[in-house]
Amino acid sequence: MKNAHMKPMIRITRKVEFSAAHFYHNPRFSAEENRRIFGKCNNPHGHGHNYVLEVTIAGEPDPETGMVLDLKELKDILQREVVDRMDHRHLNYEVPELAGKIPTCENIASVIFELLEPRITQGKLYRVRLYESADLFADCTADGIGSNGKDAPGSIK
Amino acid sequence: MKNAHMKPMIRITRKVEFSAAHFYHNPRFSAEENRRIFGKCNNPHGHGHNYVLEVTIAGEPDPETGMVLDLKELKDILQREVVDRMDHRHLNYEVPELAGKIPTCENIASVIFELLEPRITQGKLYRVRLYESADLFADCTADGIGSNGKDAPGSIK
Amino acid sequence: MKNAHMKPMIRITRKVEFSAAHFYHNPRFSAEENRRIFGKCNNPHGHGHNYVLEVTIAGEPDPETGMVLDLKELKDILQREVVDRMDHRHLNYEVPELAGKIPTCENIASVIFELLEPRITQGKLYRVRLYESADLFADCTADGIGSNGKDAPGSIK
Amino acid sequence: MKNAHMKPMIRITRKVEFSAAHFYHNPRFSAEENRRIFGKCNNPHGHGHNYVLEVTIAGEPDPETGMVLDLKELKDILQREVVDRMDHRHLNYEVPELAGKIPTCENIASVIFELLEPRITQGKLYRVRLYESADLFADCTADGIGSNGKDAPGSIK
Amino acid sequence: MKNAHMKPMIRITRKVEFSAAHFYHNPRFSAEENRRIFGKCNNPHGHGHNYVLEVTIAGEPDPETGMVLDLKELKDILQREVVDRMDHRHLNYEVPELAGKIPTCENIASVIFELLEPRITQGKLYRVRLYESADLFADCTADGIGSNGKDAPGSIK
Amino acid sequence: MKNAHMKPMIRITRKVEFSAAHFYHNPRFSAEENRRIFGKCNNPHGHGHNYVLEVTIAGEPDPETGMVLDLKELKDILQREVVDRMDHRHLNYEVPELAGKIPTCENIASVIFELLEPRITQGKLYRVRLYESADLFADCTADGIGSNGKDAPGSIK
């Protein structure tokens, strides 16, 4: 019998959206370097995006509820940790967790991963995907790639 | 024969996108009124959107080219009149045509209509549709509704 | 000057979603006719859809707010008149306004138009578009087509 | 009572897709003119698109079925008149109705309108919308605009 | 030379859709618990969704056909195993494989995975993704996570 | 402390589109076999698609720029290696890298992976996803699955 020792792995993903302003500027770079590296994203007046966030939790459905986790609870966590913090905000000025970081899609996704991970108590945070636009998105996962390029023990993908 | 005197009407629509920041604030309102009327859009740090613009031109295809208008020329017009002016910009501070106006979806669509109309020389600008998000968009058309609610003569829909 | 007597017409559209069950059955038809006319939609256990509703209001933006109508108020109206009434409901059994009607996309759109029209007091309800799926949608407008096929006076499109 | 003499107008829209190849070339133009006017669309090897077609029928729902027209019948018409004719075809070589025309989005939409109009016997063909891509689409309607720019009598929009 | 011993892994994904009704109710819970845990999904009249299913097969393309598997055959399998079984059905009453299970997105995805896996004879079923709506989806994969959280030997992701 | 030895893995994905024509034909098959195996894709006039390409790069964001790699450079690479080569082209005749291969979604994705991999010098090419349509896409990854079905050492997913 094929795969007798395995049970299917389930991941459940919920999407939320928020709108925010940002711009890219590194005070350690010269004005010229900032313009060259960040292009029109360096405009200090800022611009903005409709961010789309997909949060994926891995686990086994509870046999009594059929659910990996309580989706209403997940919705509340996403509202509290992400939407209340970032929606209709300027990411350079109003989100302390991003202070000192360039608010790129990569860095915002990492910060959201770190904000959410300790709040997920049923199942395990598997992936945060953040779309800055339909054409650009960043994934943050707990891959835990070590310096030798091998997967860390116990990591899940 | 049905509709013997008519020929089909063609409208061609091109989509472009731009990202911009904005916030809503009317200096003639008190701080409390601004908050009440504009809600979280009143945050003076600004927030932003990926705007999606659909521009529709009505006309008859040229029998030699099969086109209502030269789409490369339309693309250049949209780049010059809209994208160069608004992409990666703060709509409250950097777009003179919006000065003194609340940069709502309605007002931005109107301004874009007025910017584009004199530039469209093949066919006729029929509609500007501006999506602020997937859930909200404004249409601006040359309906020319008169004060009695009737269509103005010669208007097209 | 072109179009000197016209001002642009603005329409603003808001999207909401709801999930509902339904099936098609006309008690005046025989079982065989019901199956033939309604196909698999006749299954009395019901099936369902994620309905997507786009509601369009026509009007002139208020110069002080830049808005055709207060979008928070519109959101409340849509929640109260449509979502609370239809979301997570069985349209054949739980929506009195649909009683005695086949809950087709056409009929649901008409009922929603009639529910919303008296509630819209800023601007004018222009169109209700209801998607039953990405491949099928119905539009209900106040076209007021008379029996001679001509537009009724004062209608807007 | 507002609009006492009107009843709401219903339009129902069905979407189908087809994939086809095409290129643009006018034998009355020089090679240089063809390249200048049609750009990379002039490549004689052809290229292609996933066309998305939305067909809209206007009418009043039948009180017994709740439907403007039988959607299974519409599906059959679209399959026979459009998909069988154009799907997985080269539009320059295999669609007689397009012979001698540049297969632009505008011209294909017109041809589809003319193919479908006589087949729609319940309700009235209101609009054919053809997406060549997410960023470009053409609408063909029976507007019947006369030479004076006024709507022809009896036209519907 | 980097990765000399590897050949790229190919996965091919096909999407199908179906519409179904469901509700959540666990007879081992009290009425109050059912309402608290399942919220409006507990409504016994049922509601419904347009489900979107993405099925992913991993394998190596056949050098003669360029295909991981015969897509027409996959389409037939998806039609027979999923669409015929679930489309325009009530998932609580009409799908024996879901009997005794809460028809959550997670459980339906698992059931579909189990239905499809023995039917895929070219390549290997890699993932079933089921969207209940644009905002919620479940993935079922053959990860075979063991009790120690490590990947089972031979698993692919 | 959970996962003390890991840092989050970031992957950034950029989307581009191109339109191309193709057909399927294997000269080693008889005409009858070609028709049976490839169906309407065997039509020698060709048909076409709007291909959507998502390219994913894995790596760690540079602390000074917040970016896994320079997105403008990635855009240039995608333009040069993919769009310039395939957009508005016939894949059977004009792309040397596909010569002798059936231009299926699987094979095109593989060719793109091989074209891009040596050009990505910041981070590592993780996945190429190619949509032939909204309903069909192929993923090519450097999984490096060995003959025993186990992951090759050092592979990342």
Image (cartoon, coloured by chain):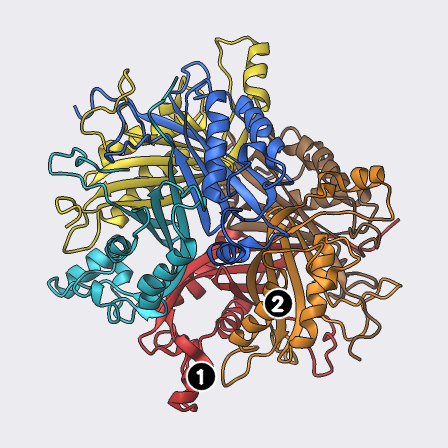
Chain colours: A red, B cyan, C yellow, D blue, E brown, F orange
- Count numbered badges in the picture: 2
* Relative to E100, residue C63 above or below: below
* Relative to C27, residue A46 above or below: below
Q: Quadrant of the C terminus of chain B?
A: top left
Q: Residue B77 location, x and y as percent?
A: 34, 60
Local crowd at mark 1 within 10 Å, few (<14), some, or many (≥20)? few
Which of the 4 image quarters holds residue E150?
bottom right
Q: Secondary structure at mark 2?
A: strand
Q: Which mark is residue A36?
A: 1
Q: Is residue C25 visible?
A: yes
Local crowd at mark 2 within 10 Å, few (<14), some, or many (≥20)? many
Q: Residue A48 location, x and y as percent?
A: 37, 67
Q: Residue F32 location, x and y as percent?
A: 84, 37
Asked if the residue at tag 2 contacts the one at tag 1, i.e. Cβ–Cβ closer than 8 Å, the answer is no
> Disc 1 is attached to a residue of which chain?
A
Q: Is residue A64 visible?
A: no
Cα distance, mark 1 to mark 2? Answer: 24 Å
Query: Left or right: where does residue F94 sit relative to residue F153?
Result: left
Question: Badge 2 is on which residue?
Answer: F56
Q: Residue at x 78, y 44 (%)?
A: E70
Q: Residue B145 location, x and y as percent?
A: 17, 39
Q: Which residue type does callout 2 highlight?
A: Thr
Query: Left or right: where does residue B33 sit relative to residue B57?
Result: left
Nearest to the observer: residue C46 or residue D140: D140
Q: Which residue type does callout 1 highlight?
A: Arg
Which of the 4 image quarters holds residue C140?
top left
